[in-house]
Amino acid sequence: MSTSPPIEESAPAPMTRRRFDTESPWVVNASRLILLIVLFALWEIGGGWLFDTFYFSKPSLIAKAFAKDIIDPAFYTDLATTGLELVLGYVIGGVSGIALGILLARWRFVGKICDPFLLALNSVPRIAVAPMLIVWFGIGYSSKVFLGATLVFFITFFNTLAGIRSVDKALCDIARVMQATEWQIFLKVMLPSASSWILTSIKISLPFALVGVILGEFLVSSQGLGFRLNTYSTNYNITGAMAIVFLMMVLMLLLTAITNAIEARALRWRPKSAAEPVAQS
Amino acid sequence: MNAASQAGGAELALAGVGKRFQARDRVVTALEATTLTIENGEFVTLVGPSGCGKSTLLNIISGLTFASEGSVRLDGNTITGVNRSVGYITQQDNLFPWRTLRENVALPLELAGVPARERRGKADHWLARVGLDGFGDAFPYELSGGMRQRGNIIRTLIYEPSVILMDEPFGPLDAQTRIVLQDMLLSIWESARSTIVFVTHDLTEAIALADRVLLMSARPGRIVRADRVNIPRPRNVFQIHEDPEFRRLYNEIWDELRVQVRNVDVAAH
C-alpha cells in the first residue's frame, strides 16, 4: 500500500517581531500594571485636593482600614461565613442546575412542558422575593445559600439544556450506526458535546453566586462580608466599605482564575480562538 | 470474478426498495423502487446528479432510515435497523472534536466493550496502516482535512463491517489528496474484500475504484445504467486515465450522465 507522507497544512509565516510587540503577553501585562499604578497614583494624589476623601477615600486610607480589618478576629468569622455560603450556594446551584438540565434534555416531553415555567421563574428579580426567602429560610446562612444557588441554578440549567439539545445529530448517527445504545450515545456523544456549554456556565455563574450571597447578607444578617460592608457604609465609613469591596474583587479574580484554568484544561480539544493569541515568548 | 472466494464481505440484495415522503401538499419520490444485488466482496460505485437519492439509498441500507417499500437483505437476512455488519462513512469526517484521533478511531471498539489495551493496539495498527502513526494523540482540529478523513475511514474499518457504505468520502478533499486516499482505500479493500457501496459525483473516481458503476437518474432517483469495469486489479489510480478501457467507459457513461445532469438543471429553473 502507499505510505504517502501525511498531508500537513503549512504553518503560518512567522510574524516579524516589531520593537514594540503588542501581541506579547509581557508587553500586555506590563502595560496593565502601569495603568493600574497610574490610576491608584491619581486617586492617591487627588484625594483631599481634587475630591473629598470622606466620599471617595484614597488607596493609603483603604490599605490602613484593611490592615485594621485583618487584625480583627470578627473579620475572619465574616470571611468564613461568606465563604461557606458562597461555596454551598455555588455547588448546590451548579449541581442541581446541571442535573435538572440533563434530566429535562433526556426527558424531552417533560422538558417541553417545563420550559416556559422555568423561564418565568428565572425572570423573577431575586431582590423582589428575597424578603420572603428570609421568612421561609430564617435569618441564618440558609437564606443566603438559597439566594446564591437560585442565580447559579438557572445559568447552569439553561446552558446544560441548550448544550445537550444543540448536539450535532450527525455525531449521534455515527454512534448509532456503530450500534451504540441510547445510554452510550448520551454518555459519549451528548454529554461531551455539551461540556463546553456546561463549563462556560460554571465559569460565568460564579460571580452571581457572590451577588446572591451578599444580597442576602445585606437584607438580614449578623455576620458575613456583606454584613460588614453594610455596617461600614451605613456608618458613612466609605474607606472601610471600599476595603471590603476590593477584598471581594480580589477574591473573585482568584476564584475566576481557578475556574478559567479548569475550563481551559477540560476544553483543550478546542482550537485556540483568534481572540486569545497563543502565548509565545 | 474470483473475488468471492476470498471475500470477507456479504451479499447485499435490494428488492423493490423505494422511498417517498410527504412534503406539504404533495408526495415526493426520493427513490423509485430499486432492485439490485451486490455480490459478496464487490466494489460498487453510484454516480448521478445531486439530489438523485444516492444518499437516501445509503441511509436505507445502513438502517438509519426506513424504505417506504421493498426490503434490503444482507446474506439473506432482512435489515430492520442499524447493524454492526454495515459501516457508514460520510462526506463530513465527523470525528468527535473532544476525542484524540486514537480515541476517535477506537470508538466503535469502545462501544462494543473491547478492553482499553486491545483498543489501543488495534487503533495504532490502523493509524500506522494509513500513514498516521505519531498522530494518535492529536485532536481533530490539529489535523488537515485529508488526515481527518483517513481517521474517519479507519474508524469504520477497525470494526470490520462486512458491508461499507461510503457517501462521497473524498468530496471535500483536493485532487492530489483524493488520489492518494483512493489508492489507500483500494489496497485496504483488496486485502479485506468487504462489500463496498461508494457514492461519488466524480466519474473518474467511480470508474477507477469500481467493479461495477451504477448510474442514477435525476429525481425521482432510479438506476438507469450499470457498467462492469473490466480493468484488471490491482489498479494504478495514478495512471488509470491512460487505460483504453477506462476511456471507453468514461465516454459512454458521461454521455448518459450529461443528460441526467441537464435534467436537474432544467428542473431547478
Image (cartoon, grey):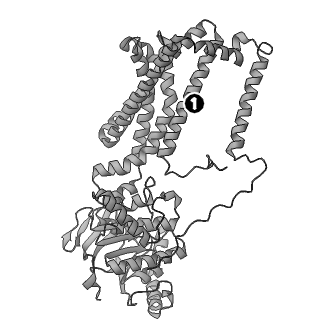
Q: At 40% from the left edge and 48% from the top edge, which residue is drawn? A: A192
* Residue B229 visible to the viewer: yes
Q: Residue B252: percent from the left, percent from the top?
A: 44, 88
Residues A187 and A24: in front is A24
Q: Spot the residue most to the bottom.
A: B244
Choose top left, top right, bottom left or bottom right for residue A42.
top right
For label 1, the residue is: A253
Residue B71 lies, with reference to residue B40, above or below; the image says above
Chain bearing mark 1: A
Residues B241 and B113: in front is B113
Q: Residue A19: percent from the left, percent from the top?
A: 79, 49
Q: At 53% from the left edge and 59% from the top edge, which residue is drawn? A: B142
In the rendered view, does A9 fall on the left or right side of B14? right
- In what quadrant of the picture does the N terminus of chain B appear? bottom left
Identity, as a three-letter code, of the amino acid under mark 1: Leu
* Residue B155 visible to the viewer: no
